[in-house]
Image: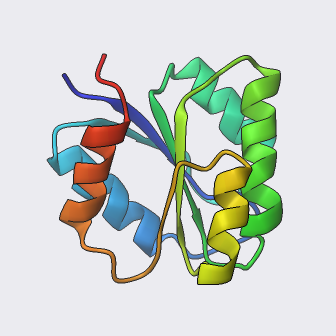
Amino acid sequence: MPRRILIAKPGLDGHDRGAKVIARALRDAGHEVIYSGLHQTPAQIAETAVQEDVDAVGLSSLSGAHKTLFPQVIEELRRREADPVVFGGGVIPESDISELMEAGIAAIFTPGTPLDEITAWVEANVPAR
């Protein structure tokens, strides 16, 4: 069964090409994808995740604010008693990945990760409906 996945861009990052590429790859793999657009607050992302009843949230950051914004999205989801699988991607230094995973991010995909690797990870780690 397809999974419902929200792709979101937290913060003021104005670059969404990568997020759109991931959204399309997940859609082409058979999943239902909702793209929330640019300049979303962590609260807006969490609220959309709840309203859309998603199974996963994919966060994209190219601005360097991932260490602040990704954990804030997790916090906002918990505040709403929502527990989708949250994964992230973008220009994220290797040294930041363990801290993000400790905050509740299930996986981080950096530039150059093959799309089929990302879709396979989603199928293996996001429970089907």
Q: Is residue 73 visible?
A: yes
Residue 125: image location, x then y, percent: 36, 39
State the residue at coordinates (35%, 54%). Answer: 23
Left or right of residue 11: residue 87: left
Q: Hey, which quadrant is residue 55 in on the image?
A: top left
- In which quadrant will I find the C terminus? top left
Residue 99: image location, x then y, percent: 73, 63
Q: Is residue 100 above or below residue 64?
A: above
Residue 46: image location, x then y, percent: 69, 33
State the residue at coordinates (81%, 47%). Answer: 72
State the residue at coordinates (78%, 71%). Answer: 65
Left or right of residue 34: residue 103: right
Q: Is residue 27 above or below residue 62?
A: above
Between 101 and 51, the one lying in front of the other is 101
Left or right of residue 119: residue 19: right
Left or right of residue 87: residue 26: left
Q: Is residue 40 visible?
A: no
State the residue at coordinates (81%, 37%). Answer: 75
Q: Is residue 71 above or below residue 108?
A: above
Looking at the rendered structure, the number of numbered marks drawn on it comes to: 0
- In which quadrant will I find the N terminus? top left
What colour-coding does the image apply? rainbow
Residue 16: image location, x then y, percent: 51, 70
